[in-house]
Amino acid sequence: MSSSATISAPIAPTALDELCINTLRFLAVDMVQKANSGHPGLPMGSASMAYALWDRSLKFNPRDPDWPDRDRFVLSAGHGCALLYALLHVTGFDLPLEELKRFRQWGSRTPGHPEYGKTPGVEATTGPLGQGLANGVGMAIAEVALGARFNRPGHRIVDHYTYVLVSDGDLEEGISSEAGSDAGHLHLDKLIVLYADNHITIEGSTELTFTEDRMARFAAFGWHVQRVEQSNDVDAVALALQNAREKSGRPSLIAVRTHIGFGSPHKQDTAAAHGEALGVEEVRLTKEGMGWPVEPSFHIPEEALEHFRRAVARGDSAQTEWASRFKAYVQQYPGLAEEFQRVIDRRLPNDWDADLPAFRAADGPMATRVASGKVIEALGPRLPEIMGGSADLGPSTHTNIDGAGNFEPENWAGRNMHFGIRENAMGAILNGMALHRGLIPYGGTFFVFTDYMRPPMRLAAMDALPVIYVFTHDSIGMGEDGPTHQPVEQLLGLRSIPGMVVLRPADANETVAAWRVAIGRKKGPVALVLTRQGLPVLDLSSYPGIPAGVPLGGYTLADSPEGDRPEIILIATGSEVHLALEGRERLATENVQARVVSMPSTNLFASQPDDYRGKILPTGVPLLVIEAGASLGWKSYVGAQIAVISVDTFGASAPGSVVMQHYGFTVENVCKQAHAVLDRLKEKASCA
Ligand SMILES: Cc1ncc(C[n+]2csc(CCOP(=O)(O)OP(=O)(O)O)c2C)c(N)n1
């Protein structure tokens, strides 16, 4: 096969290379052993290929991990993070040895899987297998898109590679085919994937489950594929990397035959090396067998450290070289240079919202998906950093930017993306684009199909990424396609993701306001949940509270004549707001004075101060919630006689008992909360 090559140059690593590789191996071994938790096998087997990349190719500056033109490195097999932490420490990132000794402990910068934002040099949160690979595709897309926008002849200010290290599990996951197919189709030739082909997963040999020809699979996707037979052959890996960089028009997969738990006399090449500490005795035998001092642990030979730390000077000179190129660019193209800085800093231009429409009652009925499409049209020319599309539902999701061209191999300047019917990869690609910086990515599909992209949405929230989702056909109101296409529990599901802002606007004008929230949110994803069916337009002259109310999540859209003393409050979201308004009028004829609260975002409303929420939903006034979705979740509005001990944020990396304690799962807290409920009830009874 012309696109495949096997590289096995018979060159042994130099003594210094070997010393450095063993340093990485044993740092990882000691980290896992000290924590008595983690995955030593992959780091031991992949240390040599990671070393070949980090020592010979990777462009990075440990002293400025966020330098925009650095190469990206994503460890998709996040369970092997001890290797990444070892690399970050020895090459001089702000990750002291002390942190390596606190691997997987409470509050450390070395959590159980890499967490973006927690550790300098970690480019993406990884752990759910396959996601990191698709993140890499998104990063590579961002690189070529920004290159197309900003590079000029003789001035390449965006010019870097994206490297991803994957394991068997990454390639077994379906998302790897979605993302691999997309990357091949798009000719993303600056994406290079190293595959730790160690033939072992948790349940044993890959012979149990994973026997297809992976190389042929990626070659069929349009990738350039190479095989390195011996992972310890650093020069062969370096050569394969060089070949990959020189290959234009295709992303690269380099399958490297690694050995899980390399060097461990009883665990190498077995699943036993995968997910638990080697054990004191096995650590001793492994170290002895490889000529490594058994004590002290966390040993870093001076010679190795000195060699690794050259990365600091190398990074500094690479960045300095880039800075001088950027300086020349500033002189030649001052406007573009300013734009580049602006998008990298995620600053919005002053007039970004100047063309946003205000809809009138006469424009209705209008589906909120249609209104959203008009907003995207208005934003397109003023916000060149917005870029996105749909998972083959563009004509229904109204996600096209008019006149912005298709993003495709012949036109990386295009901003309309066609993700194909690949929702999971779409979500992860959007994350990669956001992680890269320089773009505001968005993606759309039918709301019910968010079930296919929940893993990347969860990670977008965890990483506080500014990704925008355009989800249409938002309820049973979408009609004929039936229950398979009618979302019911999806609203509740999305709202329950910590940090996810879900907005379900009631009409075209609330949709405009919702988009304002989405564009303005620099940290964290926003899901816009939109109707298929037409809805009346709430004219701003009759409902002037909309623009200020939507960002607060919930607001009084129509009040009772008594103002702050309604007899009942009707809370509604999205299309049901119109029903609430009708209900209010009918109730008035029956001498019941109701207030209508439109609540496009329960998440945003929950984050408002108590006094605001108390004003909108005064204590003691009965509530009627109207929403075409699961009721669970609204129970939090039922009253003061309930207390909940729950987990409403993400977890944290530390031993289980410590985490439980920090989150309030203690006898003391159980008693404290019980007393609080009883006291409140007593107080109520004595007032009665
Ligand atoms: C989506 C997902 N499913 C399951 C897991 C649990 N898991 C962690 S590693 C792993 C497979 C290990 O095999 P491999 O990917 O080859 O890694 P290695 O054994 O080489 O360390 C599994 C199933 C996960 N992290 N993500």
Image: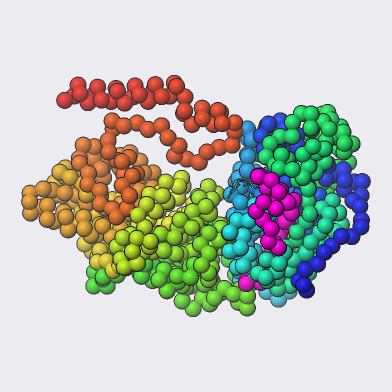
Judge whether residue 291 can be spotted in this image: yes
- When the figure is inspected, residue 428 is found, relative to residue 647, above or below; the finding is below
Front-lying residue, 592 or 24 = 24
Residue 482 position within the rendered picture, expressed as x and y whole percent measured from the top left: 33, 64
Residue in view at x 68 percent, y 74 percent: 152
Residue 189 position within the rendered picture, expressed as x and y whole percent measured from the top left: 70, 68
Residue in view at x 74 percent, y 66 percent: 225
The answer to whether residue 203 is magenta is yes
Q: Residue furthest front?
A: 208
Quadrant of image for the C terminus: top left
**Residue 607 relative to residue 641: left or right:** right
Quadrant of image for the N terminus: bottom right
Q: How many marks?
A: 0
- When the figure is inspected, residue 98 is found, relative to residue 226, above or below; the finding is above
Residue 297 position within the rendered picture, expressed as x and y whole percent measured from the top left: 79, 31
Q: How is the image coloured?
A: rainbow
- When the figure is inspected, residue 288 is found, relative to residue 545, above or below; the finding is above
Residue in view at x 81 percent, y 59 percent: 228
The answer to whether residue 679 is magenta is no
Front-lying residue, 552 or 429 = 429
**Residue 598 relative to residue 161: left or right:** left
Q: Residue furthest left?
A: 590
Residue in view at x 41 percent, y 59 percent: 448
What segment carries the magenta color?
185-214
Residue 299 position within the rendered picture, expressed as x and y whole percent measured from the top left: 82, 34
Judge whether residue 87 can be spotted in this image: no
Query: Which of the 4 image quadrants contains residue 363?
Result: bottom left
Front-lying residue, 515 or 266 = 266
Query: Which of the 4 image quadrants contains residue 413?
Result: bottom right
